[in-house]
Amino acid sequence: MPKDKLYGKTLNELIAVTRRVGMPGYAAKQIADWLYKKEITSIDGMTNLSKRMRELLSVDYEIGLTDPVSATESRDGTRKYLYNVLNDKYIETAIIPDKERTTICVSSQAGCKMGCLFCMTGKQGFQGNLSSNEILNQFRSLPEFSKITNMVYMGMGEPLDNITEVLKSLEIMTSEWGYGWSPTRITVSTVGLKGTIKEFLEKSRCHLAISLHSPFDEERRKLMPIQHTNSIKEVLDIIRDFDFNSQRRVSFEYILFKGMNDTTAHIKELSRILNGIKCRINIIRFHKIPGSEYHSPDLENIIEFREALNAKGILTTIRASRGEDINAACGLLSTMEQNKGKKS
Ligand code: SF4
């Protein structure tokens, strides 16, 4: 029987562990301290637990940290790490250094069910949900760990399709007994799943990013099959009804495709559907993927599009493309090759 992993457990789960092992309840807080504040790598190092307690804990549990399998570095300093998860599946994680900021882009699933037309992860299908351990291991096991200032759930997978484990990982990142990060350092990106978006908004205080890509129903359906069952209108209604405090941000990701979603009609419709929502739009240049009929507009057109939206009163920025030469940029993460021949 493989041992259960302590890293990635919430305080309540650690309390349950202490009960199972026959330790006093207060030991859960001590274990959380060792896991999330003192960066311990073995149960034996938990020196404020008695030797007997450590022995009992070690029977069925281990810390559960895993090193990446490989790393690749981009010309622009972005790094991509490959991890083995879910008993022989693979995921990727990106680290994006930018002046005083270092952002980690974590994966929440191996592959993805959403099938967005512009995304390599979508093309590889779905292999499984990551556990909270596997999500946070991407952060903890990296050489850059202590330098990371921000976290985005924008890697492989749809975070709100794995809501339980994602919420656990967010709780560990933002609780006083965990890493104690401000929730404003974390952004969770979603295609907009109406079944779980409310749960995310209610149970976490992290920023939300919604992949929009087109304000028109039919066009969005073509780009993102999720629009068939979870229309952007329904998602925007949920956002409108939610009371965002001044700290929390909702943003919309908009990949710009040349001659497709970059017209004045799109600008007009975007300003109509987002009316009344305090938000920002992040424009992302489309990164070409094999077999795609789409192209990216020129920088000049991207800037024009941004200016037109700003003129409509929607704060709009252009997201810098990072790590394109190592396929770490938006839409390019894929472990199709590594997963080949592995059972799903
Ligand atoms: S863009 Fe995100 S949700 Fe869409 S297929 Fe890719 S990983 Fe999945």
Image: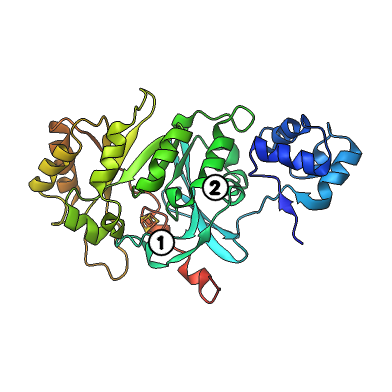
Image point (40%, 52%), residue name: 323
Picture coordinates of residue 62, whole percent (x, y): 75, 49
Image point (17%, 42%), residue name: 270
Q: If the image is split into quadrants, where does the N terminus sit? A: bottom right
Picture coordinates of residue 157, whole percent (x, y): 44, 55
Applied colour scheme: rainbow
Q: Which residue has dot 1 on it?
A: 113
Mark 2 Cα shell of 10 Å, populated few (<14), some (14-19), many (≥20): many
**Sooner in the amino-acid sequence: mark 2 or mark 1:** 1
For badge 1, the amino acid type reads: Lys
Residue furthest right in the image: 52
Q: Which residue has dot 2 on it?
A: 165
Query: Quick check: which quadrant has ligand 1?
Result: bottom left
Horizontal side of 143 relative to 209 (left or right) equals right
Residue furthest top in the image: 246
Q: Secondary structure at mark 1?
A: loop
Look at the numbered disc 1 and say if its residue's Cβ is closer than 8 Å to ligand 1.
yes
For badge 2, the amino acid type reads: Glu
Q: Is residue 338 above or below residue 276?
A: below
Horizontal side of 5 relative to 342 (left or right) equals right
